[in-house]
Amino acid sequence: MRIGGETTRSIRPGATRASFSVLDQTLLPWRVAWVDIATPEAAAVAIRTMQVRGAPLIGATAAFGLALALRDDGSDRGLAAAAAMLAATRPTAINLAWALARVSRAAAALPLRERAARAWDEAVAIADEDAAACAAIGRHGTPLLAAIAARKGRVNVLTHCNAGWLATVDWGTATAPIYAAHDAGIPVHVWVDETRPRNQGAALTAFELGAHGVPHTVVADNAGGHLMQNGMVDIVLVGSDRVARNGDVANKIGTYLKALAADDNGVPFWVALPHSTIDWQVADGMRDIPIEERSADEVTHVSGAAADGSPMRVRVAAPGSAAANPAFDVTPARLVTGLITERGRCAASEAGLRGLYPEAG
Ligand code: MRU
């Protein structure tokens, strides 16, 4: 990822293994500030308050948080308690539970005194593998964009929320093919859904596309259908927080509406994800993926910056009105053209997923 002209990652392990740092995404794009996290409790706060967000980055943050916990208490009880505390931070992205289970398994197999070091190594591996997986997603997704550009001279992508490098360790999921195509000289333009209520599109995706030099235009969430009806979108690319075994896709609230509009207008709708986002235990995503309900304040208020750049928050809903804030929705597999993973592309179905991951239980 590029930030201030520098190439870095969204999570940085400390050299002494006593802390790690993350970009505070609640301050972006107004301020670039790294937060040092030295305790499992601070990791949990960072995830809950969305200083870090995005399914793969939540998983990596929790993994480092659990490794920090084992420095103080490496017992089975300490491990289980810290893992449970971190798991309770956000319910929808399965990468969180996946990363905690992976670190727990690696540590629990060892004597107490070796656990903290082993957990840290596992967290580093999770972060490194996520960056590699996202780069591979870029390679597997680029041909989709290249084919459209070859036909039309340029490709217009629509994306929702932030499934970019800020949501992962590097490259992003939905954005990886965009960056790879752009870097390969393919003319790409991105329609960026603002993504109310927290505006991850307007604030974060636009910020990172801009930092990478990718042409983009922010649109109100409600504009997507109109753009598709008028031939202004060639492909929809989104990420996911959890993909069920049957190919149903949980992603940021509003994704389902984009899938409906894409289906009605014959626009391909692709979902990009690493293997850590697949929940093999959930057979039916429409029925069994838990949907996070967040604070009504996120709907009644918006955050932004004043003319002098200072962060501010204003109320947009009529005083006294109730507000509801389901943070994710589930797009049924039948509306998904296909999945882009680090192992290649497949149909959004159990057969498609098993074709790429035959070893999955
Ligand atoms: O609530 P958030 O900002 O954590 O939601 C993030 C998303 O929905 C992303 O699109 C998803 O995690 C895919 S990220 C690679």
Image (cartoon, rainbow, N blue to C red):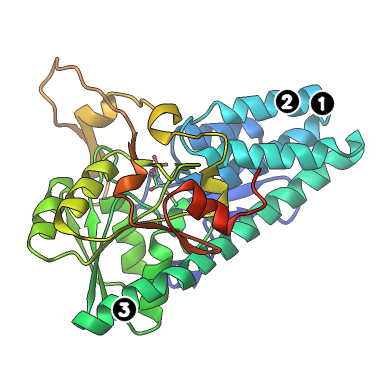
Horizontal side, residue 160 vs residue 353: left or right: left
**For residue 55, above or below residue 226:** above
Q: Amino acid at mark 3?
A: Ala
Which residue is painted at 8% across and 54% down in the image?
226
Instruction: Of the two numbered discs 3 and 1 on the same chain, state the one appearing first in sequence.
Output: 1
The disc placed on residue 147 is: 3
Instruction: Of the two numbered discs 3 and 2 on the same chain, state the one appearing first in sequence.
Output: 2
Of tags 3 and 1, the one toward the viewer is 3
* Percent x, y of residue 85: 62, 25
Can you tell me which quadrant of the image ligand 1 is in? top left
Q: Amino acid at mark 1?
A: Asp
Crowd around label 2: few <14 · some 14–19 · many ≥20 (10 Å): some
Q: Amino acid at mark 2?
A: Ala
Which quarter of the rendering shows the C terminus? top right
- State how far apart marks 3 and 1 are (Cα): 52 Å
Considering the numbered disc 3 on the image, is that residue within a helix, a strand or a loop?
Answer: helix
Considering the numbered disc 1 on the image, is that residue within a helix, a strand or a loop?
Answer: helix
Residue 17 seen in the current view:
no
Mark 2, ligand 1, within 8 Å: the answer is: no
- State how far apart marks 3 and 2 are (Cα): 49 Å
- State how far apart marks 2 and 1 are (Cα): 6 Å
* Percent x, y of residue 320: 14, 14
**For residue 150, above or below residue 84:** below
Q: Nearer the viewer, residue 257 or 222?
A: 257
Q: Nearer the viewer, residue 25 or 199?
A: 199
Q: Which residue is mark 2?
A: 80
Q: Which residue is mark 1?
A: 76
Q: Nearer the viewer, residue 7 or 122?
A: 122
